[in-house]
Amino acid sequence: MDILKAATEWAKAELVSTPFFMLFGVFFLVASIGFWQLGKSDIARAYIIPTMIAGALLLTIGLGLFFTNKSRLAAFESDYKKDSIAFVESEITRAEGTLKEYQTVVFRVIPLLIILFALGVLFFNSPGWRASLITAMAMLVVILLIDGTAHARIDSYHKQLLSAEVKEK
């Protein structure tokens, strides 16, 4: 197995996945404009700011991940050619750190926040609070969906790295 090819394929798959953050960010921004232009009720008007913030956050996440992975993709070949063993070890360390973050943040903290925000909707009656909590839940669900697929990709990549490390030793 060519580990450079696996690393490149993983990074390219991430480059395809991260624009979904940007796409959903644009959807949230369009929704914000829609609420601003068409919202007549208090609850509709309350969604303007939260959806704008969620859209901006998702766009920022998407752009940050896109450019990070784009620069990482460009550096893979030169890093691998310098020292293939060090490249594999650094990628294993990075992948393991990312998998731990997914386990903590994506699969524990985000679902817990969604539950807490859902409970908040039951207890807060003001339009501002409800709009903010519902928008936050929607944004977290988007993050959970996209990061769930990213977790599967990095887990597969991590397994490929481990098998490459065993073969090189």
Image (spheres, rainbow, N blue to C red):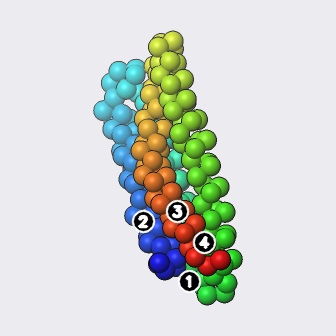
- Residue 126 visible somewhere in the drawing: no
Task: Give the alpha-carbon distance from disc 1 to disc 2, as whole Å.
Answer: 17 Å
Q: Residue at x 42, y 65 (%)?
A: 13
Given the image, on which type of amino acid does mark 3 rest? Answer: Lys
Q: Disc 4 marks which residue? A: 166
> Please, what secondary structure does the residue beneath circle 2 have?
helix
Q: Disc 1 marks which residue? A: 77
| Camera-side residue of 135 and 36 | 135
- Front: mark 1 or 4: 4
Q: Residue at x 34, y 29 (%)?
A: 39
Q: Disc 3 marks which residue? A: 159
Classify mark 2: residues with Cα within 10 Å, few (<14), some (14-19) or many (20+).
some
Find out whether the residues at labels 1 and 2 contact each other: C-beta distance under 8 Å.
no
Q: Residue at x 35, y 21 (%)?
A: 41
- Front: mark 4 or 3: 4
Find out whether the residues at labels 4 and 3 contact each other: C-beta distance under 8 Å.
no
Given the image, on which type of amino acid does mark 4 rest? Answer: Val
Say if 50 sits above or below 22 in the image. Answer: above
Residue 112 in the image: state x and y as whole percent. 55, 29
| Camera-side residue of 23 and 11 | 11
> Please, what secondary structure does the residue beneath circle 3 have?
helix
Q: Residue at x 40, y 20 (%)?
A: 42
Given the image, on which type of amino acid does mark 2 rest? Answer: Ala
